[in-house]
Every structure is written in structure tokens, then in C-alpha cells.
Image (cartoon, rainbow, N blue to C red):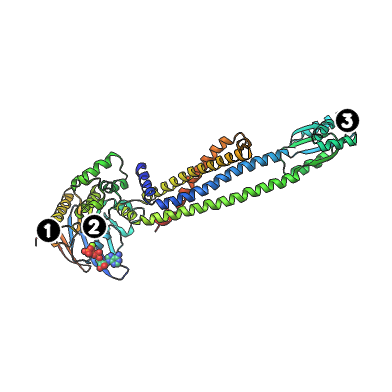
Amino acid sequence: MAIKFLFEEAFRSLFRSKRLNMISLGAMSMSLMALGLVLVLNVGIMELADFVEDKIEIVLFLTEDAKTDEISMLVTKIQDHPQVIAVYYISKQEALEEFSQDAALQDLIKVLGNNPLPSSLRIQLMEKTPENVKRFISWLKNLPGVSEVTYGGGDADRLLKALQFVRLAVLILTASLVLAAMVIIANIISLMVYAREAEIDIMRMIGATNGFIRGPFLIWGVIQGAVGGILATVLLYVIWYLLRYYSMHELGIDLNALLPPASRDQALTGAGLIILAGCFFGFVGSLVSVGRQLNE
Amino acid sequence: MIQFHHVFMTYQNEYKALRDVSLEIDRGEFIMVTGPSGAGKSTLIRLVTREILPTKGQVIVFDQNVAKLKAVQLPYFRRKMGVVFQNFRLLYDRTVAENVALTLHILGTTGRTITREVNQALDRVGLTRKKNVKPWHLSGGEMQRVVLARAIVHDPPLLLADEPTGNLDFATGWEMMQLLKQVTETGTTVFCATHNLNFIQKMKKRTLFLDKGVIHGDRNKLHGN
Ligand SMILES: Nc1ncnc2c1ncn2[C@@H]1O[C@H](COP(=O)(O)OP(=O)(O)OP(=O)(O)O)[C@@H](O)[C@H]1O
Ligand SMILES: [Mg+2]
């Protein structure tokens, strides 16, 4: 069967029932827009999660009387641990400098007279799973010259969990929107097949195979999906543009500056993904519906 | 080419459209079937195209029992026949040429071949001038000729014509009959149903007389009147 003829037939149905086409196109682009939002959110949440995870470190406070060679031995020992990525040594002096960036604390330290801050080691772990961290901390506590070990994971864990939850919720919402769009497409295909029943009957009488009859509907579905995807990305871009414009003029914030440097490439990939997803949903929607209707 | 063995056809409403019909049609034959309205002529043709299945008995077409045809075989079975439907069954949103080309598209023909064969078929039925016109701008006789062109464009071994002169005046109907005659000359078997006895008489072909679903006579042209 010639591809050209298939496409001509598909376009015939595109231009025949304009209202039905509008409805399915609307449903398609709406759900794809939601999908686009999920993609954006997903990237944002992942970046945030990475950022938060990076900030989680184990802090080991050294005893007041720890000597330099003791400390360097300890550092070597920790560095040799297979789970450790990096160890930073923060001296009493550095700790004080870091601390005194805050004006109120500065005053406090002045009152105290001498530097009460211990020197410490900051340790980055490879895998920050709770068990891993726990095991590592108990190992640290048995090393000589260690006064205390703290882990800033509790709050971060809760934040990560919340982010995961948001991601899941948005994902479920989108899945239902996509499903709804597919159901709408399937039903509209049913209507179109129904409207063309006489024509399909004639084609069958002349010797058309199921594939010949199905083909144009499948292409129709893919075209709907592709156009819906393009519409969705354009709309998303317009929304982003308006948001940026608004925040620039009303708030004086350039939203572009907040984006990670790779986001331009990611936006293109995202747009491609949305359009591809549209084609796929359109294809599946029409395949299911035409298949069901032709198997009489 | 076509054999009926004690065929009965009963529609859902218990109406017996055909009763114990047996017949045999050879390759290359021109056979006509006549009888009053409701006699079962269209039913006969619909059994051959396997639009319907016999309630009892066997219908054999191209040496195949139509009841045994699988769904996937059916399209290929139908491609070996052309059908002129009593109610035209044209696609009214397509031009004459597109209607005729549909048969070839279904067969998988592509490109220039389609244009050439469509032009040939339209030339055979004398409709070249109306090539790019939509069917509803055509007269009944012209529509009938489009249907014929669509049915013969792929030179099928079997042509079924159900009331091809249906709404035509005598002269136009007679032209249609001449076209069908030309089709047999290329070796195609033609099976034509008509209630118009004028044509039966003038054609002098083998004729089946059908009434209330029963064959009352099978007059061969060789036997004369
Ligand atoms: N789909 C159907 N359901 C029920 N009865 C039918 C159906 N098709 C035909 N019949 C009946 O079967 C009988 C034969 O019909 P058929 O169409 O074969 O007659 P015909 O000889 O072609 O008539 P005409 O010359 O009017 O076309 C008629 O009485 C008709 O009412
Ligand atoms: Mg009839």
C-alpha cells in the first residue's frame, strides 16, 4: 500500500470532521502540557534533591588535645575507607571564621573571649543511605581522637521524602490526564469509524484488508499526537515567557538566571519527548479503538 | 467458476429468500438472472460476494467454499471480482477518478500505473470527460458507469452486476448492456441480475428465471426461445 495514499486518507479524516478533530486535539495538547510540566518539575526536583544531598555531610569533631600527627593519621585512615569521597579538615581558626560571618554570633564569641569551637573533619560519603551512614558513623566513633560525630541527614531526608512525594503526586495526576486524553481519542476514533461505516463497508466489498482500513486512522492518531505535542510545547513556552516577563518587570528577577546552565538543551529534549509521547498516545489510542471496532 | 448446491437462504425475519437453488456457471460465461422484485436476485449475488452466508447448502466460487473462507482470506477473494451494486455504493466525497482508483489502491497498485489504468477504465465506459467531477453532479446512467469502471479497472475474472440498468431509460440501459458484453469479450465471467425482460430478450444470453426464491427456468442461449 502506497504511503502517499495512506496519508491522503488520513488527511481526509482530518479535514472531514473538524469539530471532532478540535476536541481530540484540545484533549491531547492539554494532557501533553501536563506531561511537560511534570518534566520541568522533575528536572527541578532532581536538581534540588542533588543539591540537598550534596550538602549532607558527616562532621567529626576532634578532641581538644588532638595532635597534628594524630589528626593526619586519622585523615589518612578515613580517606582509605572505600565509601569516602573526600575529607576536609577545618581548624579551630577556620571554624571561628566561618562562624563569625554572622554578626550576632561574632558578638557572642567576643563575650566568651577565647575560641570555643573545636577543629573538625567534614566527610563526604559515596552512598548516603541511612544504614550506610549509621554503620560508618559507628566506625568513626571508635577511632582515636574523635570526640563527637554529627550527621545533618535528618531534616534533609525529610525534605527529600517530601520532594519524592510531590513528584509521585504530579506523576499520577499526569498519568490520569494522559489516560483521559487517550480515552477521548479512542472515542473520537470510534465516532469517526462509525461515521465512515458505509465507506468502510464499500472498501471491504472491494477487497480492502483490515490493515488498509486501519492504516489511515492510525496515521490520523499519530498526526493528532504530533500536532498536540507541538501545541503543548508552544503553549508551555508562551507561559514561561509570560512568567519571565512578569517577574522581570514586577519583581525584578530574571527567571533564566535561576535555571541550571544545561536547561536550554533539556528544554529541547523535553519538547522532543512531549511530541514523541503525543505520537505514541495517539497511535495507541487509535489502535485500541479501531481494532475493537473492526473485529466485528 | 460458480456453483450452488441446494442453497437455502433465510434472513433473520424467517423470510425464505432462496429455496433449494442449484446452478453452475462456467468460466467466461455471460449469464443473466431475472425475476420480479423480491425474487432473490440480489441475495444470489450477495452469496457469491460472501456478503452473506447460505443458511443451508454450499456456494462454491473460484473452487472455494465461501463458508470456509477465513476472515484474512476474504479481501483477496473479493479482489478477484468486480461488483456493480444495485445502489451504486460510490464514495460521494471523492471524484470519479478517485472512486475508480480506490480499487487499485486496495490492490496495492501505485503511481503512474493507477493514473493509466483509471484513464483506460473511464475510457471504456465513456466517462473520460467527467473524471474530476464528484458523483452527485452525475446523472444516474453516469453514476452507474462509474461503478462499472470501478468494478472492471483491475480486470477481474468475475463481474457481478446487480440491476446495472436499474434507473436508466432504455437507450442508456442498452449502452450499459453493451459495455457488459465487451467485458465478457476479455474473458471475464459476467453475472447480471435485471428485472427488465426487454434486455433479456435482446441480449440472447443464458438466463435464470427466479421467483419467490426458486429457479423456475435456466434458458440457455443455444436453445433459443
Ligand atoms: N437483509 C435482509 N433482511 C431481511 N430480509 C431481506 C434482507 N435482504 C433481502 N431480504 C428479503 O429477501 C427477499 C429477496 O430480496 P432480494 O433483495 O434478493 O430481491 P431482489 O430480487 O434483488 O429484488 P429487487 O428486484 O427489488 O432488487 C425480499 O423479500 C427481501 O425483503
Ligand atoms: Mg435486488
For the C terminus of chain A, the image quarter is bottom left
Q: Determine which residue is flagged by label 1.
A: B221
| Outermost bottom residue | B14
Q: How many marks?
A: 3
Residue A255 versus residue B199 in the image, above or below = above
User: Same chain, marks 2 and 1?
Assistant: yes
Chain at numbered mark 1: B
Left or right placement of residue B160 versus residue A194 in this view = left
| Mark 1 or mark 3, whichever is nearer to me | 3
Residue type at the position of mark 3: Lys
| Mark 2 or mark 3, whichever is nearer to me | 3
Left or right placement of residue A11 versus residue A33 in this view = left
Q: Secondary structure at mark 2?
A: strand
For the N terminus of chain A, the image quarter is top left
Left or right placement of residue B164 versus residue A162 in this view = left
Residue type at the position of mark 1: Lys
Chain at numbered mark 2: B
Q: Earlier in the sequence, mark 2 or mark 1?
A: 2
**Disc ID at residue A67:** 3
Q: CA distance from mark 1 to mark 3?
A: 126 Å
Left or right placement of residue A193 versus residue B97 in this view = right
**Disc ID at residue B2:** 2
Q: Secondary structure at mark 1?
A: helix
Residue type at the position of mark 2: Ile
